[in-house]
Image (cartoon, rainbow, N blue to C red):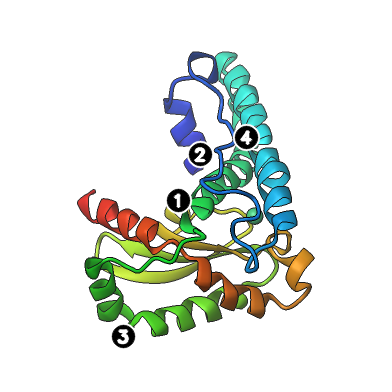
Amino acid sequence: MFALRRLATAPLAGSRAAHSLPELPYAYEALEPVISRDIMCLHHSKHHQTYVTNLNAAEEKLKAALSKGDISTAISLEPALRFNGGGHLNHSIFWQNLSPESTQPSDALKKAIEDSFGGVQQLKDQLSASSIGVQGSGWGWLGYCSKSGKLKIATCANQDPLQATTGLVPLLGIDVWEHAYYLQYKNVRADYVKAIFEIVNWKDVSQRFEKAKSC
Ligand SMILES: [Fe+2]
C-alpha cells in the first residue's frame, strides 16, 4: 500500500508534471565492453520508458478514481503503481550507479564497508552472491540501515523498491532482470554481475551514503 498511501496524499497528477525518462549521464556505448550499446539503448529507451509511461497512466487512473471517491478502483491500482513506480525508481538509481570512469569509495564509505563486511572485496563477493541468487527477475542491493547505522545487502523481487520493501536506503543496485544482460551474457548471470563491478560509480554510491546518513 506504500504507493497508494504516498500518492493519495501527494498533489494529484493534474497539478504537477508527469514522470519522465531521465537522460543517461553518458552515451549508450560508454559502458562497453562491460555492457553493450545495444543493451543500454534497449534498457533505457524501451524498458525504462515503459515503466515511466505505465506509471503515468496508473497515476492518471488513480487521480480519476480518487476524484470520484472510488476507493475500490484506487486500491486495485496498487500493483501497477508498485511495479511501474518501482521500475522507474530503481532504474533512475541504476544509471547513476554506473560510470565509464574509474572511481573509488570515499574514505567514509570504505570504513563503513570494512565495518559491515570486512572490506570492499568481501562486499563485492556477498553482493554478487546475493544478486546471482535472485530467483527470476529482481535486484541485488547495497543499502543503508538508518536504525543500526550499518550497511546491509538485500534482494528485491521484480521491481519492488528497496526502501519501501525493506526500509533500507538504496546505495548501489544491480539489475538482474534478463533484459539487463541476456543479449550479451546469455544465461550466464554470474559473468554479468562479476563484470559490473568494473563500472560501478563509487562516487555516486559515496554521495548516496552521505545523504542517507544525514536523513
Ligand atoms: Fe532493468
Residue positioned 68% across, 75% down in the render: 189
Locate residue 196, reporting x and y percent. Answer: 56, 70
Kind of residue at badge 4: Leu
38 above or below 197? above
Query: Which residue is the site of mark 4?
Result: 55
Query: Which residue is the site of mark 1?
Result: 164
In this picture, residue 172 sits left or right of residue 189 = left
Q: Badges 1 and 4: C-beta atoms under 8 Å apart?
A: no
Q: Is residue 167 visible?
A: no
Kind of residue at badge 2: Ala
**CA–CA distance in space, label 1 to label 3:** 27 Å
Locate residue 7, reporting x and y percent. Answer: 48, 30
Q: Residue 45 lies in what quarter of the image?
A: top right
> Of label 3 and label 4, which has the lower sequence position?
4
Q: Which mark is residue 3?
A: 2
Secondary structure found at label 2: helix
**CA–CA distance in space, label 2 to label 4:** 11 Å
Secondary structure found at label 3: loop
Residue 16 versus residue 196: which sits nearer the camera? 196
Query: Which residue is the site of mark 3?
Result: 118
Q: Is residue 134 visible?
A: yes
**CA–CA distance in space, label 2 to label 3:** 36 Å
Q: Residues within 10 Å of mark 1 (few under 14, many from 20)?
A: some
> Of label 1 and label 3, which has the lower sequence position?
3
149 above or below 191? above
> Of label 2 and label 4, which has the lower sequence position?
2
Residue positioned 55% across, 38% down in the render: 22
